[in-house]
Amino acid sequence: MDLGEVKRKARSAAAARRAAAHAAHGASAPEALAARGLPFSKGPGQHVVSGFFPYKSEISVLPLLARLAGEGWRLAMPVVMGEGLPLLFRAWEPGGMTVAGVWGIPVPPETAEELVPDVLLVPMLAFDGGGYRLGYGGGFYDRTLTKLRHEKNVIAIGIAYAGQETDALPRADFDQRLDFIMTEEATCRCA
């Protein structure tokens, strides 16, 4: 079986696990993330954090983003620019205007300032102890992290329910490793 087929099967199983975790913890997980905050303080040169609007059964990071805005971080949201392209990030603030983007996911309007994040909160279907994630298969975050890591020091924080962890994930050479994983239960630095 080729890697693409292995990943497709893994995505199906991971989506079911995430949906179950969301049903069990979806109401309390966003506040747990917000109460904990980022696993580090804002450092010199760090000022932009990118979040995401929850899609399907993803944990909402909106309460965490509200906290980070209060701590002085500038916020950005990702925008899909097209198949095979890295994400673009536009300025956003809690309650700020959005328009429908790809798959109906809200995005800041084209008039919003384009920003380059220092920290990315990254959604996923599954993760393993090595800091690798399984996404939806579009490669948007992998391409984006590859691009940004060639330009500057960025921190990638995977956001998931604890129940999304798996022993090992199928991965290719282009799959990007996360620096931290945050769940409703704990925050772990990826070794």
Image (cartoon, helix red, strand yellow):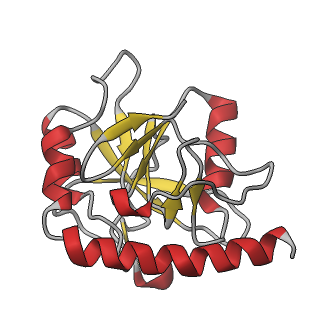
What residue sits 46% from the left and 50% below the top? Answer: 114
What residue sits 41% from the left and 84% below the top? Answer: 104
Q: Is residue 101 visible?
A: no
Q: Which of the two residues, 124 or 76, is positioned nearer the viewer here?
A: 124
Residue 58: percent from left, percent from top:
35, 69
88 vs 112, left or right, is right
Residue 91: percent from left, percent from top:
35, 51
Residue 134: percent from left, percent from top:
59, 62
Residue 82, picture quadrant: bottom right
27 relative to 61, above or below: below
137 vs 6, left or right, is left
Which quadrant holds the C terminus? Answer: top right
97 vs 167, left or right, is left
Q: Is residue 1 visible?
A: yes
Q: Which of the two residues, 48 or 186, is positioned nearer the viewer here?
A: 186
146 relative to 136, above or below: above
Residue 43, picture quadrant: top left
Residue 137, picture quadrant: bottom right
